[in-house]
Structure formats: C-alpha cells, structure tokens
Image (cartoon, grey):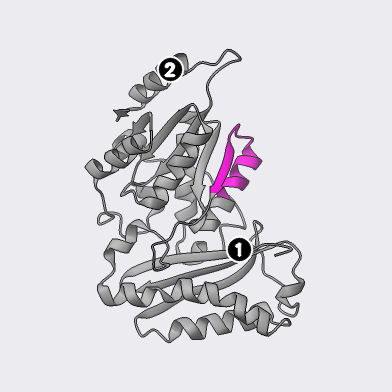
Amino acid sequence: MITVHSIQELRDALRRAKLEHRRPDGDPAIGFVPTMGYLHDGHASLLSQARNQSDVVVLSIFVNPIQFGPNEDYEKYPRDEERDLAVAKQHGVDIVFMPTPDMMYPTPIKTKVHVDDITGPLCGATRPGHFDGVTTVVTKLFNLVQPNKAFFGMKDAQQVAVIQRMVADLNFPVEIVPCPIVREEDGLAMSSRNVYLSEAERAQALVLSRSLRQVDSWLQNNPKLTAPELQQKMREMIAEQPLASIDYVEILSFPQLESVSPDMPLEQRDGNILIALAVKFGRTRLIDNRMLTHGE
C-alpha cells in the first residue's frame, strides 16, 4: 500500500498500478472508495467489496470543506490518520489518496456540479449547498482516479441516489455500487459522528433503528397504513426520547425521492420506498433509513 498526497503523486501511482496489474485483455479494474476518513467497520465493508471486485483499490480520505455549512462541524470533524491507514492496509487497499484542501481547491472554486430535484428533500432541505459540495468533490475525484466502480454506503441513501443520477446524466464511465448499512451490535448505524455522542445520547439514539424495525409490525397489524400514518407513528416513537430533536421523518420513492401518495396504503406500493430519518441528539445529527422493496 502506498500513500500519496498530491494529484501528481496519485497519477503516477495509478499509472504504475495499471502497468503492474495489467490484464491480457486491457487495463485492470479500478475500485474506488471515497471517504472523509475516521474509518469504521462501515467503511471497511466498502473496502472489502472493492477488494473483491477490483484489481486495484483506491481509497481517498478528504474532509471536504465545501460540503459543510457555516455552522457545521468541519473543523471538529473527527480525524485519525494513523488508524485510517491501518484499516486501509488491513483491507487490501493499494493506493491511499490524502490531499489537503489547498491541493483540491488551490483557488476559490468557481465551478460546481448541481443535481436538481432529488437534492431538495431530506438532508438537502436543512443543509443548503451540501450536495453541491458532494457532487463537485466526487466529480473531481472521479476525474482523478478514473475508477471502473465506486462504492458508497446506503446509510446516506440520498447521497447514493444523487451520485447515481449525476453519473447517469453526465455519462461518467463508472458503476456506482451501493453497499448495505453496517450497524453496531445494538443496532446503531455506524457513523464517524457517533463518537460525539454522550452515553445518554447514544442510548437514546437506538430509537432510530428500533423505529425502523417496528415498521414491519405496524404494516402487518394495519395493511391499510398510509405514509402519513406511518410517519406519525415513527415521530411519536422517536419523540418519546427526551434528548431527540427530529429533523425529518420522510417516506419517499427511491431513487426518485418523490412523495408517496398520502391516500394509498403502503402495502399497495409500486416500486421501492425509502423510509429516512434525521434526528439530533444533543449537537450530533444522525441519519438512518431502511428500504421497503417492491414485492417484499
């Protein structure tokens, strides 16, 4: 495994890797996992998938300033370079790209990539400009790494939908591979921000995964349950936790992220339905979700 910090070093490393792993029928398959670091088992699962499906695995670690709002946690976002590199090596990464903000944005950026509509709901409603920052940095990274496949966790299902749409609209020659949510033993979805939680906040945050699991029972007990009715049940359950402050509880089609008919029972749904949550516990904002798959 080699670690590079500059764009030229990355290009040189990729050129050497392509020669070293070249196949008889052409260039090797490059798998790419873009992250903001502070790696946990969720990231490790992405790296494992990339290792299984690629000849060369590239990991980027970059806390991207342009996807943070003015009152968000860019400066305090957890960082641990030594641990990140150990995780990368353990999971068979070939190249780690760790640029600085000055390397990625040497001058104030004038060009941004914007995806319409599906960036509006969910996190886009309360984090204006966030997804422009995500799509812009991912575009830059795709141009630099030129992967065959890129691996993203479904914990941020909206991000997956946005990146998939951007890739389709702009004809990027890369396959987006969505990977399942990885959870702690108690059900809490793994997140780099979990480290912010106090003991009491973490205990109460388990209501997110509990409410998502409870959906099955609610649907079984009431086959005519509609999206607004399910939202209300989930809101009431989450609100029982005194430290919980709900940002959103939404039920949307996926990947379109459009509203579900308020009158149609969810059992009669056509297509996949995303149940998505964002809740603050203290100063820590957590997201979680589950998919109701058509025919499930």
**What range of the chain is rendered magenta?**
162-178
Q: Which residue is mark 1?
A: 291
Q: Residue furthest front?
A: 185
Q: Position of residue 119 (x, y in %)?
A: 56, 57
Which residue lies at the image location 38% right of the left edge and 18% below the top edge? 12
Q: Does any portion of residue 72 appear in the rendered image?
A: no
Front residue of 73 and 213:
213
Depicted 132 relative to depicted 239: above or below: above
Q: Is residue 175 rendered magenta in the image?
A: yes
Q: Left or right? Give the position of 94 relative to 51.
A: left
- Report crowding for label 2: few under 14, some 14 to 19, many 20 or more residues within 10 A (C-alpha): few
- Report crowding for label 1: few under 14, some 14 to 19, many 20 or more residues within 10 A (C-alpha): some
Q: Position of residue 170 (x, y in %)?
A: 62, 38
Q: Amino acid at mark 1?
A: Met
Q: Which residue is mark 2?
A: 15
Residue 62 position by quadrant: top left
Which residue lies at the image location 22% right of the left edge and 41% below the top edge? 82
* The N terminus: image quadrant: top left
Q: Left or right? Give the position of 86 relative to 153.
A: left
